Image (spheres, rainbow, N blue to C red):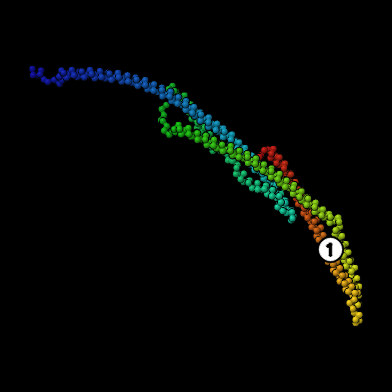
Amino acid sequence: CQRLLRPLPYLTEEWHQHNYAQYHQAFADRDGSERCRHESQSLAAYAAALAQRTQEDSTAKLGQRLQDTHFWKAELQREIEDLTAETDLLAAQKVRLERALDATEVPYTIATDNLQCRERRQPADLVRDQVETELLKVNGDGADHEAVHSLIPKMPRDHKQICEMDWSDKVETYNIDDKCGRYNNQSTNIQFHPSSSNASTPETWAKFSHDNIYRAERERLASINLRLLIDNILHDTAEDLRLQCAAVDEAFAKRCEEMEDAKHKLEHHLKKVRTLKEIGDQENNIAALKQAIKDKEAPLKVAQTRLYDRSFRPNVELCRDPAQFRLISEVEELTESIESLKQKLLEAEQSLRNLEDTRMSLEKEIAVKSNSIFIDRQKCMAHRTSNKLMWGVWNKERLF
């Protein structure tokens, strides 16, 4: 009986509590499982909807990005085409400027040749006249050759290359984004990849292309302004050269007329000297003066002999009578006449020498004028006339 009363591990009440705990746990686990299933289904549906929505949004963003990329790609392409066209125009302008600079050497060479030719003029005509002044102006225009040469432009290739690289990147990016936009859940070439961390922001991305286009447009505008400046300089240079050429030609023509007039006047005076036989007449005059002096010697001898003989009158007979006074005055008058004739003879001889010198001087001066006219007309003006054809070629080819 005592064995029947041995203590048991659990009481009945504990047994019921244990069972209730098992029931409660089973209910809680079943309820938790049902809740987990419902939450899982909801989460899966949400995740599926979210994945679809985010994918659609990403696809839309890629589409918008394609439009942005296409816009900047088109802007860059337009700017590249404009830069290419402007570069071609500037290259043509560069060739035109170089040819024009070569062409300006011709009037400079002609002017230098004219100045060197005119250095062979003889003294008296070797003067700084209007012709030389105008020729030196041509040389002064030629001194600006280096200044004009500095305008030869450099091709704006740097900005064009930058835009081309940016455009190439845009084309590659457009193709990548276009390919990405075509991916879907059924695509076979999709896989897991790590994300990129070194990406630019949309603002810096747009600013990069904007700045490239802005700098390219600024360079293109500078090129356009430079071409306009070159056009104006070429036009002004051509006009200045033409005007200066005309001024030199006019100065040459006027100077030749002046020298022709001076030569004619010199020839006229030389002709007078020769035609009127002034030298011969003066020689005859000298001979006549010498004869007149000789003719006065006999009367002077007569008068002096009379005075001499009368000085031998004796005693009181040696009187200063009227005859004596007249003889004395006669000697004085004859002596004075002879001295006057001798003085006139000296003057006539000097006049003859002057006439000879004048004749030689006139002949020499006429030769000087003939030489100057030959240099200006036959050398300088003929050289200028033959080279005027070159100006016609320049105008025809529109080098200026």
Residue at the extreme front: 322
x, y percentage for residue 14?
17, 19
Q: How many marks?
A: 1
Residue 169 drawn above or below residue 127: above
Q: Nearer the viewer, residue 378 or 55?
A: 378
**Residue at horizontal 41%, vertical 30%?**
195
Which type of secondary structure does the marked residue at label 1 adopt? helix
Q: Is residue 81 above or below residue 346?
A: above
**Residue 137 placement, left or right of 286:** left
Identify the residue at horizontal 49%, vertical 29% (top origin).
69
**Residue toward you, 222 or 125:** 125
Does residue 123 appear in this view? Answer: yes
Q: Residue furthest left?
A: 1
| Residue 249 placement: quadrant | top right
- Residue 43 percent location from the top left of the image: 35, 21
Q: Is residue 46 left or right of residue 165?
A: left
Residue 201: percent from left, percent from top: 44, 32
Q: Which of 331 and 211 lies nearest the eye of the viewer?
A: 331
- Name the quarter where the N terminus is drawn: top left
> Three-letter amino acid code at disc 1?
Ala
| Location of residue 357 (image quadrant) | bottom right
Q: Decide if residue 188 is in sight here.
A: no
Residue at point 47%, 28% (across, down): 65
Q: In the image shown, does 387 or 351 lie closer to the viewer?
A: 351
Question: Could you classify mark 1 by the number of other residues whose Cα lies within 10 Å: few (under 14), some (14-19), or many (20 or more)?
Answer: some
**Quadrant of the rendering where the C terminus is positioned:** top right
Q: Is residue 99 left or right of residue 283?
A: left
Residue 338 drawn above or below residue 150: below
Q: Position of residue 152 (x, y in %)?
A: 60, 42
- Residue at which label 1 appears: 348
